[in-house]
Amino acid sequence: MNSKSPMGQGFARYRSAGIASIERRLFLRQGLSLGALALLSGCRSSDELQVETLLRAISGWNDRVQGWLFDPGKLAPEYPESAITRPFPFNAFYGEEAVPRIDTAHYRLELAGLIRERKPWSLTELYALPQVSQVTRHVCVEGWSAIGKWSGTPFRIFLERIGADTTAKYVGFECEDNYYTSIDMASALHPQTLLAFRYADQILPAKYGFPMKLRVPTKLGFKNPKHIRAIYVTNKYPGGYWEDQGYNWFSGS
Ligand SMILES: Nc1nc2c(c(=O)[nH]1)N[C@H]1C(S)=C(S)[C@@H](COP(=O)(O)O)O[C@H]1N2
Ligand SMILES: [Mo]
């Protein structure tokens, strides 16, 4: 993807940040099922070959992910609109039929923790904030990626507007579907991190996270919460839905 190949450097940095643990988990899961398969077929001699092929695939997948995520300029790559993936994939920890339906008029974004002005925000108020657009690549830990266009308010501006303590360690998110995640403050303040209200110039469709998602192009997809109900600032490690099941918490550049 990146012609200048920041891969070596990025890969090393990413590994030190802990992707190795995801790789181990994947290997364990896949390795076990391969083992079970071998038992069933009574063919254990092909195990090692299969495992090797699998490891190569994982490693190649890792390399691709590093390539998509890391950029020497530290900004995530931006793309022309012609590069947008159509249709853009849906993903959640449930199927598309279970996507939450949120009522525009009654919705309020709740704020908590180390924030000076914690009044809830209506969608009308949120839509009146300054808006910018970005075409970036979303990289899912499951091994797919897609380019999309999101518009919204630079999260840094929102955090400043509400008087968030930007010296705190974490920003946490709670979602209408009970998903939750959290990011480091540096990533929250990153110039490309958006509180996004639109996808492809339209009000965010339900499946992509209505009424808003945090778009963090420097991080893996699962660090991009959809259907945000509450945002809080804290120094106490908040974890996350996938993070608490062992996925690397930082998962980004
Ligand atoms: N609220 C909520 N946010 C979520 C998820 C979820 O299940 N619920 N899944 C995450 C994962 S793993 C991915 S890959 C992206 C998918 O976003 P998309 O539907 O816009 O492709 O949302 C992330 N944010
Ligand atoms: Mo994902």
Image (tube, rainbow, N blue to C red):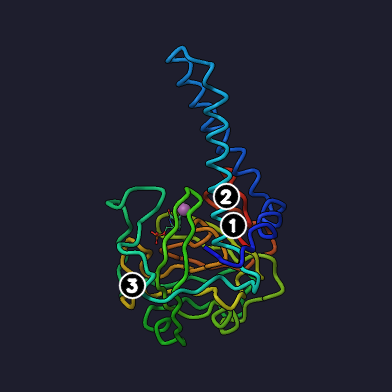
> Disc 3 or disc 1, which is closer to the eye?
1
Marking on residue 62: 2
Residue corresponding to mark 3: 106
Res. 25 image quadrant? top right
Marking on residue 66: 1
- Outermost residue toward the front? 3
Disc 2 marks which amino acid? Answer: Asn
Disc 1 marks which amino acid? Answer: Gln
| Drawn side of residue 108 relative to residue 243, left or right | left
Tag 2 near tag 1, CB within 8 Å? yes
Q: Alpha-carbon neighbours of circle 1 within 10 Å: few (<14), some, or many (≥20)?
A: many
Q: Alpha-carbon neighbours of circle 3 within 10 Å: few (<14), some, or many (≥20)?
A: few
Identify which residue, 100 or 209, lies in the foreground: 209
In x, y percent, where is residue 139? 49, 58
In this picture, is 26 found above or below 78? above
In x, y percent, where is residue 109? 45, 72
> Disc 3 or disc 2, which is closer to the eye?
2
In x, y percent, where is residue 53? 53, 34
For mark 3, give the secondary structure: loop
For mark 1, give the secondary structure: helix
- Where is the C terminus found, in terms of image quarters? bottom right
Question: Which residue is drawn at the image coordinates 34% and 74% (left, top)?
Answer: 200
Disc 3 marks which amino acid? Answer: His
- Outermost residue toward the top? 42
Question: Which residue is drawn at the image coordinates 53% and 33% (left, top)?
Answer: 29
| Drawn side of residue 94 relative to residue 180, left or right | left
